[in-house]
């Protein structure tokens, strides 16, 4: 079989209507093409592919979040925490809770989101020795800090809805815009319109 191919190649070469000089030139060109092609293949397969270290550094940077811890903590401020950190870790980063801090409306096991604020209220003691949280009487209602009693002070919000709002906030994290309040079951557009001017994030 190999001899047949060789014989055909020789016959083809002999039948070419070129002079011997032209045939030699053609052979040299063909040989150069083969050598150059082989060189490219050899170089292409010998190069080592190295992952860019910058990409890895960038990935490491994005694995952190920034949270603002305020209120009744030892050292309020903005802290950098690993991704998927929880509320109790943010409080710990701020030095822990102050004496008398009230965390009853904070879900300390919740996973944090980048850019959010954790606000810890300080409880006050009444003349009867009962610990309670002071209620804001003036100014807008800050929906990410407001207590059940502060929500109850809004038109159309009773104890049941106020509890739902605080529970929703504890489970899902802080509200991004005041309209997020309508995600709470029982608060429709009509109810929301009654007090939206009093709300702040």
Image: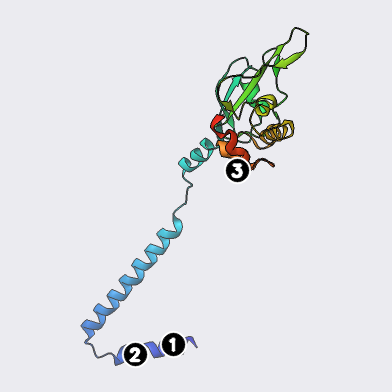
Residue in view at x 64 percent, y 22 percent: 91
Instruction: Tell me whether circle 3 and circle 1 mark residues in contact (CB < 8 Å).
Output: no
Q: CA distance from mark 3 to mark 1?
A: 87 Å
Q: Which mark is residue 12?
A: 2
**SS under mark 3:** helix
Whether pointer 3 and pointer 2 mark residues with C-beta atoms closer than 8 Å, the reply is no
**In this picture, is 118 found above or below 56?**
above
Q: Indicate which disc residue 5 carries.
A: 1
Q: CA distance from mark 2 to mark 1?
A: 10 Å
| Front: mark 3 or 1 | 3
Relative depth, front residue between 166 and 161 = 161
Q: Reading the chain from its start, which is encountered first: label 3 or label 1?
A: 1
Q: Residues within 10 Å of mark 2 (few under 14, many from 20)?
A: few
In the rendering, at what x and y percent does residue 98 appear? Answer: 67, 14
Query: Relative to 106, is 7 above or below?
Result: below
Does the image show residue 16? yes
| Label 1, residues with CA under 10 Å away: few <14, some 14-19, many ≥20 | few
Residue 200 seen in this snapshot = no
Tag 1's secondary structure? helix
The span from disc 3 to disc 2 (Cα, nearest Å) is 89 Å
Looking at the image, what colour scheme do you see? Answer: rainbow
Q: Nearer the viewer, residue 69 or 195?
A: 195
Q: Position of residue 198 (x, y in %)?
A: 56, 29
Q: Residue at x 73, y 16 (%)?
A: 132
Q: Position of residue 183 (x, y in %)?
A: 64, 42
């Amino acid at each position: 079989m190999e001899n047949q191919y060789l014989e055909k190649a020789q016959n083809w070469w002999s039948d070419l209507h070129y002079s011997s000089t032209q045939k030699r030139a053609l052979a040299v060109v063909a040989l150069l093409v083969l050598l150059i092609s082989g060189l490219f293949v050899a170089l292409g397969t010998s190069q080592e592919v190295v992952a860019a270290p910058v990409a890895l550094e960038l990935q490491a940077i994005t694995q952190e979040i920034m949270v603002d811890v305020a209120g009744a903590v030892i050292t309020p401020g903005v802290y950098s925490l690993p991704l998927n950190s929880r509320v109790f870790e943010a409080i710990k980063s701020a030095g822990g809770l102050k004496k008398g801090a009230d965390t009853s409306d904070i879900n300390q096991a919740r996973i944090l989101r980048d850019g959010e604020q954790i606000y810890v209220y300080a409880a006050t003691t009444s003349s009867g020795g009962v610990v309670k949280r002071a209620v804001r009487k003036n100014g807008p209602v800050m929906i990410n800090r407001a207590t059940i009693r502060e929500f109850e002070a809004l038109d159309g919000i009773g104890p049941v809805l106020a509890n739902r709002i605080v529970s929703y906030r504890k489970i899902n994290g802080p509200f991004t815009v005041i309209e997020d309040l309508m995600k709470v079951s029982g608060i429709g557009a009509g109810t929301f319109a009654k007090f939206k001017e009093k709300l702040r994030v």
